[in-house]
Image (spheres, rainbow, N blue to C red):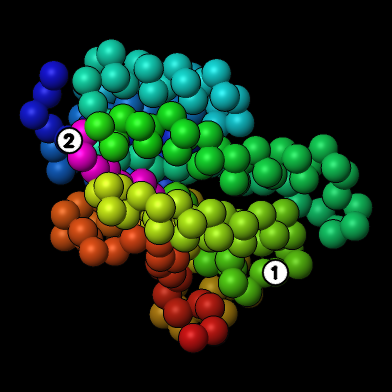
Amino acid sequence: MTANKVAIVTAAGKGMGAAIAKELAANHYNLALMSPSGAAEELANSLGALGLRGSVTEVDDLQRLVNGTMERFGRIDAVVNHTGHPPKGPLLEIPDADWHLGLDMLLLNVVRMARLVTPIMVKQGGGAIVNISTAPLFEPEVAFPVSGAIRAALAGFTKIYSDQYAAQGIRMNNVMPGFIDSLAETKERKRRIPMGRYGTVDEIAKTVRFLLSPDAGYITGQNIRVDGGLTRSV
């Protein structure tokens, strides 16, 4: 068993997931990483971490990830639930199968992971979970219908979960990235951002690291916008 904190990061092969893994490794976390491709395994090898190939939509893969983490490190202090992009399309032309896939990718991935790690964290006396959501959570856009609808449910689950487990030392928060440099930049999107630029994956990673740390020890059940001022609501 290690004295360092242990974190699980899903969809950690590239983009924000990989940046989060690197940020946590630089801050002395031991890591367990998973992605559907072999990219998380490659990154894990470079960081001295545990790497697995699997999908957040598969219950058995999540179980393997948690079991492997406990076998290697003996504890789980933090989880970052990151995932890929859900299906898109004209609102009423999206088939049921794509809505069900979005549910598995964006909500049930968090619910299922919480079922697996919460008993471990309760026994340890605490832990922290961060879910990577999206800035249009409270201002849904027609371009991202599955994401906007289902991630609103994620916000509800996060609040309910945090209320239930706060007294046991477990925190859960959502990070809501705006347009980040892991996406292709367009002039139209850039014009909408008050800061005049896309965010960076490193800025998201540092926000996640803060929310997992004791410095954020009184923050739970929140949806934290990291969007350069993109969203307009107050």
Residue farthest to the top, as pictured: 71
Tell me where the magenta segment starts and ends, as one range: 124-130
In the image, 120: left or right of 164? left
User: At 53% across and 60% down in the image, what residue appears?
Assistant: 155
In the image, 205: left or right of 138? left
Q: In the image, which is nearer the foreground, mark 1 or mark 2?
A: 2
Q: Which numbered dot is residue 127?
A: none
Answer yes or no: do the residues labelled 1 and 2 have beta carbons within 8 Å?
A: no
Residue type pointed to by label 1: Glu
Residue farthest to the right, as pictured: 93
Residue type pointed to by label 2: Lys
In the image, 51: left or right of 182? left
Characterize the local packing of mark 2: few (<14), some (14-19) or many (20 or more) Cα atoms within 10 angstroms: some
Q: Which residue is mark 2?
A: 5
Element carrying mark 2: loop
Does label 1 or label 2 sit earlier along the sequence? 2
In the image, 179: left or right of 106? left
Q: Is residue 158 above or below residue 28?
A: below
The image shows residue 83 at horizontal and vertical percentages of: 53, 41
The image shows residue 220 at horizontal and vertical percentages of: 34, 61
Q: Nearer the viewer, residue 7 or 203?
A: 7
Q: Is residue 128 magenta?
A: yes
Residue farthest to the left, as pictured: 3
Characterize the local packing of mark 1: few (<14), some (14-19) or many (20 or more) Cα atoms within 10 angstroms: few
Q: Which residue is mark 1?
A: 141
The image shows residue 109 at horizontal and vertical percentages of: 55, 38
Q: Is residue 85 magenta?
A: no
Q: Is residue 129 visible?
A: yes
Q: Nearer the viewer, residue 194 or 34?
A: 34
Numbered label tally: 2
Q: Tell me the distance, in whole angstroms, between the alpha carbons under discs 1 and 2.
A: 38 Å
